[in-house]
């Protein structure tokens, strides 16, 4: 008998993970809580929200779930993995103690300092007056002011001078736009360079990097508009070569995994550092203790090995034994969003044209639901359309060809996903 695996979330990331898990001969069933219309078609949705730990633990007991694969940030800091361990259910995901590396930026900065992991110089404050006095003492030097807690990726404010910085502090600590996430602030030096991120499978002691993916965070073409969860991604990344990948492994990922183990909070799961590559090499902007969305949607289609086996071995501390093979093909994923996202948008529009998509194209659902009219929009990011190709250029062409066949009222997508990497000659030697 194969395993019954639980995923928590309702994004394109969870649909992609469910799709990949379903290919494993050792997986009988995937349950997604709460899931979306895409996961409903290949797995079973359970109407339980990610922060409802009691509800999730009940579900695991009731259904006899054999394995939990953590993908989104919410459940782990609330102790879901700890609770499941107590029930004897193996998990690929961090305990609450290990998840502090994402859930508390203040804790993560102190952790990096303890272990010599490169990150911007910083100070942590609990009191508004102290933070304000510190900013005033530094004058116009450029800083970034961050709410320490989880703030849906929006809690970091990049400032140009003292006026900006005081305003950012006001937003976080006085207006409390991020709620309790802003009880503690981190003020750090602003770094200069270019941004990338990494994903690594971790088993508590060892880490193995996945291929790199480049994400497009801004809403509009040319990296304009508001920050979003991500409007598209491609892999391999044009900008990460072998030397940089090695530096990220040796200076960031390995010391983080070793440091957490040494401190009694071994990290099992996917570690996803956000990095600034400066003239002195990679610096950590933040650690995520989860999978990226939409990065996951372009990384997993390139995985030729069995995802469940890798995660099961990692949960047992035996990642070295895992066969992890990646396709040399490129993947490009374009997010189709509701007009207005990431600010206000409408939902409930019928999604048309899904049946016109070529059979080898992957359409991962995020904000979708099924009602009597069929599949309707139900969120900001609605679908990620992913194509594989021998080159980024080919994958990109095929992704956009298929995106054009799907429609709903107010749909919008960026036209420049992977454009920078679409020259066939730029792909050689990329990770
Ligand atoms: P974070 O949530 O900490 O990853 O920050 C969100 C975004 O703010 C990053 O993706 C960067 O664009 C920017 N950022 C954060 N920290 C810094 C820093 N020290 N220097 C420059 N930009 C930063
Ligand atoms: N795409 C960025 C993230 O998942 O945080």
Image (cartoon, grey):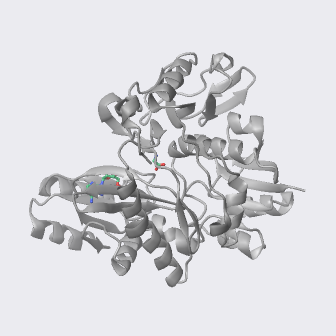
The foreground one among 389 and 265 is 389
Above or below: residue 112 compared with residue 222: below
- In the rendering, at what x and y percent does residue 262 appear? 50, 84
The foreground one among 170 and 267 is 267
- In the rendering, at what x and y percent does residue 411 appear? 50, 22
- In the rendering, at what x and y percent does residue 123 appear? 26, 72
- In the rendering, at what x and y percent does residue 264 appear? 55, 83
Above or below: residue 157 compared with residue 261: above
- In the image, farthest residue toward the right: 1
Could you tell me which residue is drawn at 57 percent across and 54 percent down?
Answer: 72
The foreground one among 12 and 357 is 357
Occupied quadrant, residue 243: bottom left
Kindly tell me whether residue 173 is visible in this rendering: no
State the quadrant of the N terminus. bottom right
Could you tell me which residue is drawn at 28 percent across and 53 percent down?
Answer: 157
Q: Seen in the image, is 423 located left or right of residue 158? A: right
Kindly tell me whether residue 313 is visible in this rendering: yes
Could you tell me which residue is drawn at 59 percent across and 35 percent down?
Answer: 367
């Amino acid at each position: 008998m194969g395993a019954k695996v639980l995923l928590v979330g309702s994004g394109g990331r969870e649909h992609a993970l469910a799709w990949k898990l379903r290919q494993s001969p050792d997986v009988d069933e995937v349950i997604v809580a709460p899931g979306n219309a895409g996961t409903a078609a290949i797995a079973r949705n359970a109407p339980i929200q990610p922060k409802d730990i009691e509800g999730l633990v009940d579900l695991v007991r009731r259904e006899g779930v054999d394995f939990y694969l953590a993908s989104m940030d919410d459940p782990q800091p609330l102790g879901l993995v700890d609770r499941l361990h107590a029930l004897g259910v193996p998990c690929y995901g961090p305990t609450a103690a290990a998840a502090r590396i994402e859930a508390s930026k203040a804790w993560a900065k102190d952790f990096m300092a303890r272990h010599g992991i490169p990150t911007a110089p910083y100070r942590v404050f609990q009191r508004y007056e102290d933070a304000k006095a510190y900013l005033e003492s530094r004058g116009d030097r450029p800083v970034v002011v961050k709410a320490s807690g989880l703030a849906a990726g929006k809690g970091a404010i990049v400032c140009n001078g003292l006026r900006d910085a005081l305003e950012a502090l006001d937003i976080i600590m006085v207006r409390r736009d991020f709620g309790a996430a802003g009880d503690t602030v981190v003020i750090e030096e602003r770094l200069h360079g270019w941004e990338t991120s990494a994903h690594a499978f971790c088993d508590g002691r060892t880490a193995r990097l996945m291929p790199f993916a480049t994400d497009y965070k801004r809403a509009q073409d040319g990296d304009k508009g508001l920050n979003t969860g991500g409007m598209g991604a491609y892999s391999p990344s044009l900008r990460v070569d072998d030397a940089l990948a090695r530096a990220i492994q040796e200076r960031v990922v390995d010391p983080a995994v070793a440091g957490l183990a040494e401190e009694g909070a071994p990290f099992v799961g996917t570690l996803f550092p956000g990095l600034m590559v400066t003239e002195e090499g990679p610096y950590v902007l933040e650690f995520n203790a989860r999978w990226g969305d939409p990065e996951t949607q372009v990384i997993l289609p390139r995985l030729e090995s069995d995802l469940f086996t890798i995660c099961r071995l990692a949960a047992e501390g035996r990642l070295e034994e895992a066969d992890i093979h990646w396709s040399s093909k490129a993947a490009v994923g374009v997010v189709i969003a509701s007009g207005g996202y990431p600010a206000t948008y409408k939902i409930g529009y019928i999604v048309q044209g899904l049946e016109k998509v070529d059979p080898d194209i992957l359409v991962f659902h995020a904000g979708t639901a099924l009602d009597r009219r069929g599949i309707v929009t139900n969120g900001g990011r609605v679908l990620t359309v992913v194509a594989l190709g021998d080159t980024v250029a080919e994958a990109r062409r095929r992704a956009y060809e298929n995106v054009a066949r799907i429609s709903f009222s107010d749909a919008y997508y960026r036209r420049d996903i992977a454009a920078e990497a679409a020259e066939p000659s730029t792909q050689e030697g990329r990770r």
